[in-house]
Image (cartoon, coloured by chain):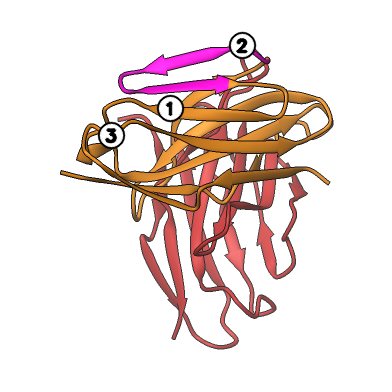
Amino acid sequence: DGGITQSPKYLFRKEGQNVTLSCEQNLNHDAMYWYRQDPGQGLRLIYYSQIVNDFQKGDIAEGYSVSREKKESFPLTVTSAQKNPTAFYLCATKTGQGAGNQPQHFGDGTRLSIL
Amino acid sequence: EDQVTQSPEALRLQEGESSSLNCSYTVSGLRGLFWYRQDPGKGPEFLFTLYSAGEEKEKERLKATLTKKESFLHITAPKPEDSATYLCAVRQETSGSRLTFGEGTQLTVNP
């Protein structure tokens, strides 16, 4: 079954703890993205990666880190430096093939809360 | 600074009552406007891409249109299952594959 898998669906973080959110895709898409969604706000870009072993900061990268060691995987770590981590986190992917304006496709998100 | 503004923030309709959602944008060099539907607790689901002013796309009860300053998502004879948050996003010529999202319109269709 093709798609984008985010896990876990719910995650709780203690003070001073780093947590890692998983995003895996079997769509063979080149680009992957991490967004944060807060109530009443649009999606805000945290990090993105166009190819393996390369990634760029988005608009709100502080307190977050990523890696892209495999095409299929783009994990996001929420570090203890992120003081307000409670949000809904969305991973998206996009093919690099065909016409340049292909849409991004999204997973079903991870909801992170502070204990 | 690129801006995407959606209105209204929330819209409540009766089943069968047609209406439109608005997405206004100010970007330099639009390279695509995207509409998504998001159900509670789920990721956004892609609906349409519009590239140039005058373009229209349709899918079931939804029709998206584009001008040089805004896009409309027209909903004809909506059903309760159309209830969701509708997001628009724009890609501009200097942003690569990055998208700028609006805050969404929460649509509720009552039976």
In the displayed structure image, the side of residue B107 where residue A114 appears, left or right? right
**Residue at x-position 23% and y-position 32%:** B16
Give yes or no for contact between labels 2 and 1 (Cβ–Cβ under 8 Å).
Answer: no
Kind of residue at badge 2:
Gly
Front label number (2 vs 1): 1
- Label 2 element class: loop
Residue at image mark 2: A98
Where residue B109 sits in the image (x, y, percent)? 26, 44
In the image, the chain rendered in red is: A
**Residue at x-position 53% and y-position 41%:** A92
**Residue at x-position 72% and y-position 42%:** A53
Q: Earlier in the sequence, mark 3 or mark 1?
A: 3
Residue at image mark 1: B74
Quadrant in which the C terminus of chain B is drawn: top left
Let me know if residue B55 is in the magenta part: yes
Where residue B6 sits in the image (x, y, percent)? 58, 45
- Label 1 element class: strand
In the image, the chain rendered in orange is: B
Q: Which residues are magenta?
A: B53-65
Give yes or no for contact between labels 2 and 3 (Cβ–Cβ under 8 Å).
Answer: no
Q: How many marks do you count on the picture?
A: 3
Is residue A39 placed above or below B33 in the rendered structure? below
Front position in the image: A61 or B15: B15
Residue at image mark 3: B17
Chain under numbered label 1 = B
Confirm whether residue A76 shows in the render: yes
Where residue A93 sits in the image (x, y, percent)? 55, 35
